[in-house]
Image (cartoon, rainbow, N blue to C red):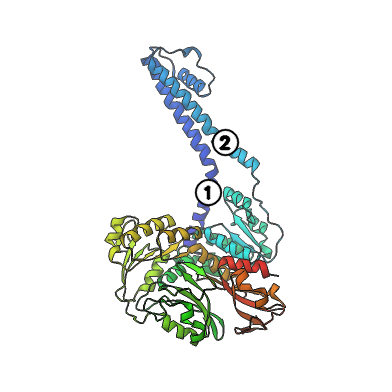
Amino acid sequence: MYSRQYEYHYHKIKSSVFSCMQRQTRRTVYYLALVFVTTLLLTGVYNAGMASWENRPQPLYRSLEVVIQSFTTTGYGEDAPWQTPQMNVLAVVMQFTGIGLILTAVDVFAVPWIRDALTPSAPEVAPELENHIIICEHTPRTDAFIGELDARDRNYVLVESDPETARDLYERGYRLIEGDAETTETLANAHLESAMCVVIDGADDRSASIALAVRDARPDVRVITLVEDADLAQYHSAAGVDDVLSPRQLLGERLAEHLPTAVTTEIDEGVTIGEDFELVELTVSEDSDLAHSTFAEAALRERFGVNVIGAWFDNDFKTPVDLDDKLQPGTRLLVTGEPDQIESLREITASAVRDFTAQRIVLAGYGDSGRAVYDGLSGSGSRLTVLDIEQQEQVDIVGDARDPAVLEEAGIRDADALVLTVADDTTAVFTTLIARELNPDLRIIVRASEEDDVEKLYQAGADYVQSLATVSGRMLASTVFEDEEVLTYETQVNVVRLPAGGLEGTTLAEEDVRTTTGCTIVAVIRNGKTITEFDPVKFTFEAGDEVVITGTDEAITQFEQQFRP
């Protein structure tokens, strides 16, 4: 049994779903209403005109007949010709109105009919599958997750309730079925009985309702949901969800870590690969001893024993780095090594001066991500000004972040950093442009909702951008494959564990993995033991080996296409 409050959400979902099902008839209703109102209006005007201008009063039904004849271009009967210019103008208006209504009717009725006749409908039953993943509802977040699945050649079935969306996705090659995931029939059509797990990413209340339906149909299947509002996670748990993920909150925490303060620096937590081996992202500060030196001069491997996987230069990730590349302030290094080696490098890359208490930070957008940023900066000594479109607790300035006057009121000209977690990417782009113009030295950190907008935000002047869709996709992949593949989802470079596959019987030098794929093999797992030191020329991969690789999404995909068995 679930609570009365949850029942409210459940019935609210049912009402919204019913409303969505009626969308396809709205255009028809609106068109018929337009025809009805236009006909009555012109009938009244025509009837009055015949009496006043033509001095030929007639019944309303007679005027209605003439209006319909004009709309349908079947003639005007005995009323034509008219003697006054007013009535002739009115006749022309009725003719053009009739043509407009006919063209509108074609768009409302004929075009959808032709499109439906020529476009294949999305299937309602998936092909026979086993150990697959069922994804309920399509969003940019699940789209990123599907990209992770495609890269790993994992079977999935996407369940989409909106017919037009389902048809469009089906034409684009998605493996999906059309149907309502809340129904037993649709879940059976997605072969729930043989699925590995179910991932749900709809509206928060609808997702909980789908989870109830899934749990009722198959109690033992693993259910994972994503929530927009972290406060509603309890309802998902009550509905039997195994893992409730809040990517907005996670991303907010990550954005806060990219602001140097008295208690946090830009140094990220490492990814543990073996007992004494980890992968870490470090940022070179302005007054670091490494700043402005080349990689050859820095001699990181000789001095610290670490391996440099790659580095971000002006938001572009480069792997491998060239010895003459410069370690400019803000350069982010991706390195592997033992904890003591990492710690030694950490000390020299970080700023020698830790007093960041004078940091003045403007936070625009106080949703889940914004609250996570706020919590992450609380107690840091920074002077934080919160800007949001709505009045809330902790919000200092209420207004549109795109308005220069609002930004100035928030103190953007004197601020050291701006964190943008606003509702949509278009707003973020305009705000970034305006903020950069008002304060050229400002550090701008942005949360993007969709991966396609990341480059736009960099072009607008952002210093660091992280995509909610990408983080969500990796977060899902990390949760689904927690025991086998994805090791981290928090950085812009993926770290995964995969079977050595096509590398069996060869060496790294022979395959030249880094050059051909852009990936770096940082460890080999053999018989449960993690090997981090191996000679690229002499070390030979064996059957059953697994590799821990790091690289961009494109590089990971290239590696899997080339070496996955």
Asked whether the beta carbons under mark 1 and mark 2 sit within 8 Å of each other, the answer is: no
Q: What's the residue at 56%, 86% (across, down)?
A: 275
Q: What's the residue at 62%, 84% (across, down)?
A: 534
Q: List x then y, in percent, for residue 394.
A: 32, 66
Classify 10 Å Cα crowding around label 1: few (below 14), some (14-19), many (20 and above). few
> Total marks drawn?
2
Q: List x then y, in percent, for residue 246.
A: 48, 67
Q: Quadrant of residue 181?
A: bottom right
Q: What's the residue at 66%, 63% (across, down)?
A: 155
Mark 2: amino acid:
Phe
- Towards the viewer: 478 or 518: 518
Q: Is residue 320 left or right of residue 58?
A: right
Q: List x then y, in percent, for residue 429.
A: 41, 57
Element at badge 2? helix
Q: Which residue is mark 1?
A: 20
In the rendered image, the quadrant that contains the N terminus is bottom right
Q: Which residue is mark 2?
A: 109
Relative height, residue 532 to residue 10 (above, below): below
